[in-house]
Amino acid sequence: MPRSPAASRVHLQAPVASSPIGSTCSTRPATEIVAEHGEGEEAIRALELETVRVSIANLRTFPCIPEREAAGTLKIHGAYFAIRDGVLHVMDDGGAFAPA
């Protein structure tokens, strides 16, 4: 099923200031992803993967998360399941994804 090019106009950003996360997360604008990947399936996949990175960055804005990571009591893992391919992609510490 074709996807709407509207995905290329989305700007990935932190939630509104009233959330505990506030505006402390910086994210990669969708325009950069579209400039790099175009507006087709590759760009859509890149946007989907970026949402995993953004979610992890958002989690790390809560004070207890970096404290527990530093203490070694919490390890955050990012993953993306590509339904079309049936493949789980796991994110490494540098933010790159590879099939599990």
Image (cartoon, rainbow, N blue to C red):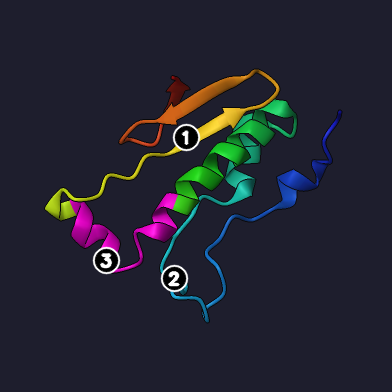
**Magenta region includes residue 58:** yes
Give the x, y percent position of residue 55.
Answer: 48, 52
For the C terminus, the image quarter is top left
The residue at 58%/44% (across/down) is 32
The residue at 82%/36% (across/down) is 3
**Magenta region includes residue 74:** no
Left or right: 11 with respect to 92? right
- Give the mark, 3 or 2, whose residue is nearer the N terminus: 2
Q: Residues within 10 Å of mark 2 (few under 14, many from 20)?
A: some
- Contact (CB < 8 A) between labels 2 and 1? no
Q: Residues within 10 Å of mark 1 (few under 14, many from 20)?
A: some
Q: Secondary structure at mark 1?
A: strand
Distance between the alpha carbons at the discs numbered 2 and 1:
21 Å
**Residue highlighted by disc 2:** 21
Question: Could you tell me what secondary structure mostly forms the magenta stretch?
Answer: helix
Distance between the alpha carbons at the discs numbered 3 and 2:
12 Å
Vertical placement of residue 19 versus 54, above or below? below
Which of discs 2 and 1 lies nearer the camera? The answer is 1
The label shown at residue 79 is: 1
Distance between the alpha carbons at the discs numbered 3 and 1:
22 Å
Left or right: 48 with respect to 2? left
Q: Secondary structure at mark 2?
A: loop
Three-letter amino acid code of the residue under disc 3: Cys
**Residue highlighted by disc 3:** 64
- Give the mark, 2 or 1, whose residue is nearer the N terminus: 2
Vertical placement of residue 18 versus 26, above or below? below
- Which quadrant of the figure has residue 21? bottom left
Left or right: 56 with respect to 68? right
Q: Secondary structure at mark 3?
A: helix
